Each structure stands twice: as C-alpha cells, then as structure tokens.
Image (tube, rainbow, N blue to C red):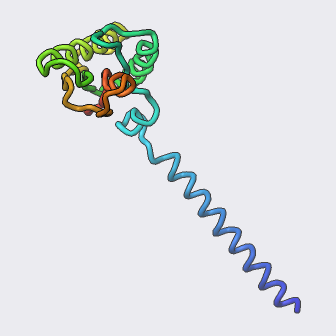
Amino acid sequence: MKRVSNLFTLALIGLISVSCTQKKNDVEEVTSSIIPGSVEDFNQNVSNTVYFGFDRYNLITEAEDVLRQVAAWLNMYKFTSVTVQGHTDKRGTKEYNIGLGGRRAESVKKFLVANGVDDGRISTISYGKEMLIADGDSEQDHALNRRAHVVVVGK
C-alpha cells in the first residue's frame, strides 16, 4: 500500500510540474510575442485614427490627444516611418474629397512634426471617399468615414 501511495505522490508531483511548466511557457509566449517598436506594438498600444467634422480638416481636442500618443511613440522609436491616410465620407465629388482627405492628412502630419517627429518620417496620402469603413447613409456612418489614419510602414 505504501508503494502505491509513493507512486501516486510521484505521479501527482510530475503532473503539477508539467502544469506549471506549461503555464510559464504560455505567459512567456504572451509577453514576448510583441516586439517593442514593431507594427504590432503600434497597432496594439497606440490609438491611430482621428476624426473630423463635416467638410473640416482642423484637429479637435480629442484628435490632438490621440496624436500626442502617436508622436510620443514615434519619438521613442525614431527609425520608424508612418503614412497618414486622409479619408472622407461619400458625399461630394471624387476630386473635392481627394483634396479634403489630403488636407486632413497634412493637418495630422503638421501636428506630429510640431510634436517632435521628423517630417521626413511621415508621408501622406488621400483616399478621399474610396476606402469607406461604413457604407451607410446615416450621420454616424458619415462621421466614421471622416478620418485620418496613421499607419506604420517601416523602419
């Protein structure tokens, strides 16, 4: 009986050891899977989209708060470049919206540069109304589309 008890104890210890090792590996995998300064780091830890009013390209307070975080991250990782994408809702002509999206992207770039980011690390592009994220006709849909989006493009 004592031998069975010892075998049971050894088996239990082995099971606990395997379980602890598995937990440790899971934790290491989760904490080490995102490399600081990477695209994944930026996408997971930094808000990267700001919104605009109808027919506007000026930054509102909420947008500036988001862009301060973007600038801080970019200033921490000085070899990373970004593209600022300007977008509009689907109202208006294609030509007008390309211009408005460009002005939105440029206003974001100007803010980032004013907050210490080298302008050579920031490119801009306007998609106008070509890349809608909400295709409906409600004001909420339009508001979601009036945005600028910061995308990490490389080091």
- Seen from this angle, which residue lies furthest right? 1
Q: Is residue 47 left or right of residue 91?
A: right
> Which quadrant holds residue 7?
bottom right
Q: Position of residue 104 (x, y in %)?
A: 26, 14
**Considering the image in quadrants, where does the N terminus appear?**
bottom right
Q: Position of residue 94 (x, y in %)?
A: 13, 22
Q: Position of residue 78 (x, y in %)?
A: 33, 23
**Considering the image in quadrants, where does the C terminus appear?**
top left
Q: How many marks?
A: 0
> Which quadrant holds residue 9?
bottom right
Q: For this rendering, which residue is in front, 140 or 40?
A: 140
Q: Is residue 70 left or right of residue 27?
A: left
Q: What residue is shown at x 20% (from left), y 16% (from top)?
A: 102
Q: Position of residue 106 (x, y in %)?
A: 24, 13
> Which quadrant holds residue 57?
top left
Q: Is residue 84 visible?
A: no
Q: For this rendering, which residue is in front, 137 or 12?
A: 137
Q: What residue is shown at x 40% (from left), y 17% (from top)?
A: 67
- Seen from this angle, which residue lies furthest front? 137
Q: For this rendering, which residue is in front, 10 or 112?
A: 112
Q: Is residue 65 above or below residue 11?
A: above
Q: For this rendering, which residue is in front, 45 or 22?
A: 45
Q: Is residue 38 visible?
A: yes
- Seen from this angle, which residue lies furthest left? 95
Q: What residue is shown at x 31% (from left), y 32% (from top)?
A: 136
